[in-house]
Image (cartoon, helix red, strand yellow):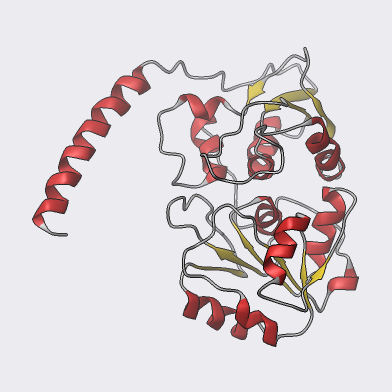
Amino acid sequence: MNIFQRIYSAIFKSGYKEIYTRSLDKVIPPDFYPPLEKDAIHFKHFGLIGDIVYAIPAMQTLAQGRNIHLHLHINQKSLYKKGMKHQNKGKILTEKSVELLAPLILSQPGFVVCDILTDQQVDFDLDYFRKYPFDYNKGHICRWYFQTYGITADLGKPWLTAKPNNEFNNEIIIARSFRYRAPGISYHFLAAYPNISFIGLKDEYEDLKNQIPDLKYIPVKNFREFAEVIAGCKFFIGNQSFPFAVAEALKVKRVLEVYFECPNVIPEGKNAYEFCYQPQFEKIVKQLL
């Protein structure tokens, strides 16, 4: 670090620390404990859908073995910065999002309700972490909930279950959103390998097919089927979006494309690889094959 970088860093950090401290003083801590007499714990979340998957360890920990009711707050304004493409037209979650997500959530241990938030009583607001003045482009999404509620869980173990779809045992499955793409990364080299399929949005598939002409597309009816495909694959490649959250939660063999401006997805446990440079990407794929 040269002298100008040191001066800039000192000024920036000093100013941020002051702003952070003032902001932190205004945050009222949430309730940490639900009423003991309750046999079901109610959670609220407004998305993103990947963040909901990353919130599952916190929900299961906070529920302490009781039934989980998840109420999703739809039609909230998108959190993505301008220019980041998203299929919900400026909304985080929609009614359709809940329809797709509910079959996956309700197939998980302890979850008995996954619906749209209306006037349900809520014990834990899983969006509360956003009141704290952290830089949410960094860190670990799962741990934002841990930090908010003073809990922990073993993130090296699977926290999502899905019956593997064995049709895809020999397939490399890819999902690559238009958001969070590492600069300088190309998927062209994968055209030399057989048995490669894409799961995700159709326009994302068409975009990647320009690099991998024989790329196949996997349609699914809902996110439970989506998870079953990933659970059954040879290995999974994805960037920082919902499909990788599913792969991470299932702990399948997985390869993460890390976006340098927002490194807030942290693979944990065995079979986890990550890259932000081309040679390392190609090495990992070769090694896994």
Tell me: 222 left or right of 150: right
Image quadrant where one finds the N terminus: bottom left
Q: Is residue 204 visible?
A: yes
Q: What is the count of numbered marks?
A: 0
Tell me: 209 left or right of 223: left
Rendering coords of residue 224 (x, y %): 85, 50
- The image quadrant that residue 215 belongs to is bottom right
The residue shown at (44%, 27%) is: 132
Q: Is residue 77 above or below residue 187?
A: above
The residue shown at (49%, 49%) is: 264
Rendering coords of residue 184 (x, y %): 47, 69
- The image quadrant that residue 32 belongs to is top right
Rendering coords of residue 256 (x, y %): 58, 64
Rendering coords of residue 239 (x, y %): 60, 59
Image quadrant where one finds the C terminus: bottom right
Q: Is residue 193 above or below residue 158?
A: below
Tell me: 170 left or right of 81: right
Q: Is residue 137 above or below residue 134?
A: below
Q: Nearer the viewer, residue 263 or 94?
A: 94
The residue shown at (69%, 44%) is: 53
The residue shown at (71%, 26%) is: 75
**In the image as oriented, which residue stretches furthest toward the left?**
3
Q: Is residue 236 visible?
A: no
Q: Nearer the viewer, residue 24 or 49?
A: 49
Q: Nearer the viewer, residue 191 or 157?
A: 191
